[in-house]
Image (tube, helix red, strand yellow):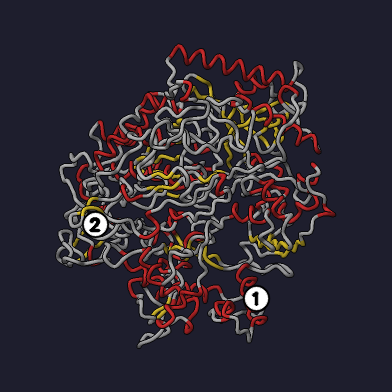
Amino acid sequence: MANSDCIVIQGSNMAECHPVGFQWVSEAKARGAKVIHIDPRFTRTTAVADKHVPIRAGTDIVLLGALINYAITNELWFKEYVSAYTNAPMIINEKFKDTEDLEGLFSGFDSETGAYDMATWAYEMEDDGTSQAGGERGQGDGSADEGDAEGHGASSGESHGSGGPPIGSGRPKRDETLQHPRSVFQILKRHYARYTPQLVEETCGISPADFEYLAKTITENSNRDRTTCFAYAVGWTQHSQGAQFIRTAAILQLLLGNMGRPGGGIMALRGHATIQGSTDIPTLFNLLPGYLPMPKVGTHDTFQQWVDAVGTKEQKGFWADADVYAVNLLKAWWGDAATKDNDWAFDYLPRLSGAHGTYQTAMGMLRDEVDGYFLLGQNPAVGSANGRMQRMAMSHLKWLVVRDFSLIESATWWKDGPEIETGELVTEDIDTEVFFLPAANHTEKAGSFTQTQRMVQWRHQAVKPPEDARSELQFMFELGVKIREKLAGSTDWRDRPLLDLTWDYPVDEEGDPDPVSVLAEINGRFESGPDAGKPLSSYTQMKADGSTSGGCWIYTGVYADGVNQAARRVPGKDQDEIASQWAWAWPANRRILYNRASADPEGRPWSERKKLIWWDAEAGKWTGPDVPDFPADRAPGAQPEPGAGGPAALAGDDPFIMQADGKGWLFAPNGMVDGPLPTHYEPPESHVGNPLYAQQNSPSRVMFAREDNLYAPGAGEPGGDVYPYVFTTYRLTEHHTAGGMSRTLPYLSELQPEMFCEISPELAELTGVEPYGWATIVSPRAAIEVRALVTERMKPLKVRGRTVHQIGLPYHWGVGSEAVVSGDSANDLLGLVLDPNTQIQEAKSNACAMVPGRRPRGPELLDMIDKYRSEAGITLATGHTRITVPDEQSGTLPPGVDPSAGESFHWPSAGAAEAEEEEAAVEHEAQAAQDARTGASGAQPDGGPNGKSPHGTGTAGHETSEED
């Protein structure tokens, strides 16, 4: 990032949430880079940026799509880069239909399942007409509605985090002129043609002047001699379209030639506590180490079916060696028990029967399908969406194990949680047996952590943990030993995977396993031959014949030569700017991915200023300060032999070596379950109609229509004015995630002692909320009380003629008696609707009401929540309509349209005069509702709008994990 000429921070408050990494933004700025912050709030990041662009939460695709359109329309895209290194010339199946053709749907959509058949998105091939989607990943999955209310589909879209899925065999047809109407470039151009500065103003609330500044700054700093970098965190990921937000930025960066180059790319900002590592060697239900997908019941019945679904030997690139990575993983886990004769113990792997994420697991608890639960470094009572659901779910367990440094709310909800106060739970009636086990903190244990930039760094133990506190490594190792002892002698085949595990790590005098021995196992070693027992130095040394093993192929090299490479600490002054001797980055200690793209098709640097790697014709290899992300001896003009597959099939100008065609994907012919191109849909609880299509919300979003997960009416629906404002969650520098490490410390608690909201002076005046006074915020799931921070940092936005008021809520507080400070949880307000690619919840754009005063206590709180629901007319179906397209494609019409009565449907597009009338009406209705709730004196809320009696049952809350 220090080499960037322009840095766009969008979906992150980097200065506060990633202060250490932000030093490189400051360094770039000192060198002359422009820094632009796009965010609903003015933050400490904004304070040091050159420009702040306020945005309506959830509309990022409109802004980024308009930037794509701007670059194409004004001929500012990097033509040589795009033509050579992306799939812009590829021809797409003639049966493909865009959202522009189908009012917001792509071809292949199944309205009953909410899933896409991706067959029509495929390339047209030279040999047999059309490519075939690889394995089951040609089908979208992961959605849920009333017929599948627990989201049983697994999130296939996340199964290839370090590369693309198969696209079938054959050679895609290309049009080098980029003029063919079905070329990716022309499809992209048509798709974003309506994403204009006017649309940005009407949808995002961004002025034409601000858009012009942003577009010019980015494009002027994206060429042969200059590069732009995007940086994001959970402000992008925690949306029902989060993966597509990131995809849109990737498309823009490819068009501008910023991928694989110094100061370019997209920086995923990951938290300090090995957040990147938790997906590399995953804690996710659908992934195995190195981004190998979990096998699925009925789909991967054999080892070969499984690895072929990841990558076939016929396709280009390194995913064709999926069998190699899989064999080495299974050998590392089961050693001598994994042989060729038993398919390397493939049958020992569990099979996915659907989605088994944290939210589906909580719902399983509520159905009494889960007996026990381990919480290690997690506080779902505060840190997960729909907090009430999480707490109620834990009350159905037989036992709960919490490992942490202090008695977090997930360990004490049974005695002092919010549901105890409301009477929904009674301590004496709860059967859950809770075990609290003290854990070692990060200073009390050694091991690796991986975060931003894929950098694996070693953490040395500073002090011994106190008393019975143990590291996770020791706890899991000892638990495994005890379980294996109890199973010793068992003849039950179901016990063989546990009994055959390699579980022989050396331990110290306290019984703590040596973490370096685990690192060595992850790295891999030779199992036979003259080098037997020696560490591998590269994943290219791995074999599929059982002669090598390795616990995570992308980490191979971290223990090369028997040296802990992650522990290296050569000072910056003693090495070049790449700093390859500081720690280790996967894969292969490569600091910039796809860096073959930093040179032109002939192998020459695009410019001397942005020189990174290049082709040394005399030496016959790629060279430069970084490790080349390309076969080292593959000449720029090289062409593969006919019939070649895998790495051998990569041409000299195929820089994206993990993609099945070697190119960067402007259009995704496979892999993204909700569409090949990012498309704007409104957030689930949006008050604004989709200005582009009749399809209001993402049709593939994962929904849970439940009494404990009710949603507010959307744009144009009756009752939408009951929850007239938008809230978005965020984090603070002074507190850490759900507060377990910060609200227990008096020093940090003093800095941020109370839960609060940030609101604009205009909203404070509208609602009658006083600065630093109490306010109650109500969603269809919960109601919380907060202190009001009235500040001009929150700006109301004009969107399609109405004023949109956004409320900022930090999420660190929770209700309990053990912390130094406590308070209501922002995440209780959240509902559960998920991104189908990642199963991550929508946490950044949600509907709410706000009134002055503190919330009611006890059962009266439930009455208040229910009264709002009743006023809004909320039912299970509210907010869970999947399709709103009024044509033959779906066979459905939006709610309230009766074709038998001769009614037709046109999505509203108000003119200027109508817009002013609409704004005045909305403001009047909001003020009238506000007066009804607060009374003329602005007193404490009386429990609901208009004093109406409640309908419906139960309350629903939610929480959001902010692990950025």
Front in this rendered view, residue 739 or 779 = 779
Q: Position of residue 308 (x, y in %)?
A: 35, 66
Task: Please tell me which residue lies in front, 905 or 198.
Answer: 905
Residue farthest along the front direction in this orientation = 900
Label 1 secondary element: helix
- The amino acid beneath tag 2 is Asp
Residue picked out by circle 1: 478
Do the CB atoms of the residues marked 2 and 1 lie less than 8 Å apart? no
Residue at left 48%, top 83%? 337
Identify whether 640 is placed above or below 919: below
Residue 137 in which image quadrant: bottom left
Residue 642 occupies which quadrant of the picture? Answer: bottom left
x then y, percent, for residue 618: 14, 65
What's the residue at 43%, 22% (across, down)?
904
- From this view, report whether residue 328 is shown above or below residue 149: below
Q: Residue furthest right?
A: 428
Question: 123 or 282, which lies in front?
Answer: 123
Say whether residue 897 is left or right of residue 422: left
Q: Which residue is mark 2?
A: 654
Q: Is residue 708 visible?
A: yes
Q: Residues within 10 Å of mark 2 (few under 14, many from 20)?
A: many
On screen, residue 569 above or below 347: above
SS assignment at label 2: loop
